[in-house]
Amino acid sequence: PASLCGTWDMISNVNFDGYMSALGISVYLRKIALRLKLRKVIEQQGDQYIIKTLSTFRNYAISFKTGQVFEEFTKGLDNRHIKSTVTWQGNKLTCEQVGEKKNRGWAHWVEGDKLHLELHCDGEVCKQVFKKN
Ligand code: RET
């Protein structure tokens, strides 16, 4: 699949509020988060990845190897400890996040010159699109 590596800037964000609600994030924090223009920085070396979510308000970063479960602490988001596994499903880098919240995870993929990210939790799906910086 096309490389996800690089610096990507958000151009659209659909139902981020629904996704954050499903995570139990407070109205106060949701209002701040909704106004942010997020940036993704994705680095890869072999099957080792670092994905950074950057904003003026708060940053979040994870580092993992595909195919290996890792302990994720969603610090500054919903502050939960979860067990995450990232694998390639066709052209999509997908993550399953097992913990208190049901049906939680995400998928990143490149289509044309855009990075797509779908985030889901319970029944809520958030869709974000980024353009290469
Ligand atoms: C921000 C601001 C503070 C409140 C919330 C945030 C949400 C971040 C999210 C990050 C997702 C990262 C992923 C990384 C994958 O590799 C923007 C930090 C709730 C949802 C999917």
Image (tube, rainbow, N blue to C red):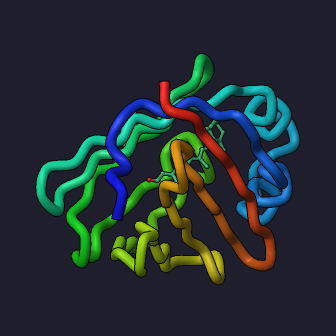
Residue 91 screen position, x and y as percent: 42, 71
Q: Which residue is drawn at 52% across and 66% down?
A: 107
Residue 23, located in which quarter of the rendered image? bottom right
Q: Residue at image x 84%, y 58%? A: 18
Residue at the farthest left position: 46
Q: Is residue 30 left or right of residue 74?
A: right
Identify the residue shown where x is 87% and y is 42%.
27
Instruction: From this view, report whether residue 109 is shown above or below residue 50.
Output: below
Say which quadrant the N terminus sits in: bottom left
Residue 26 falls left or right of residue 71: right
In this rendered view, identify the residue nearer to me: 69 or 108. Answer: 108
How many marks are shown on the rendered structure?
A: 0
Relative to 9, residue 23 above or below = below
Task: Identify the residue at image location x=64%, y=34%.
Answer: 10
Q: Is residue 44 left or right of residue 98?
A: left
Q: Position of residue 38 (x, y in %)?
A: 61, 31
Ligand 1's image quarter is top right
100 relative to 24, above or below: below
Relative height, residue 8 to residue 79 (above, below): above
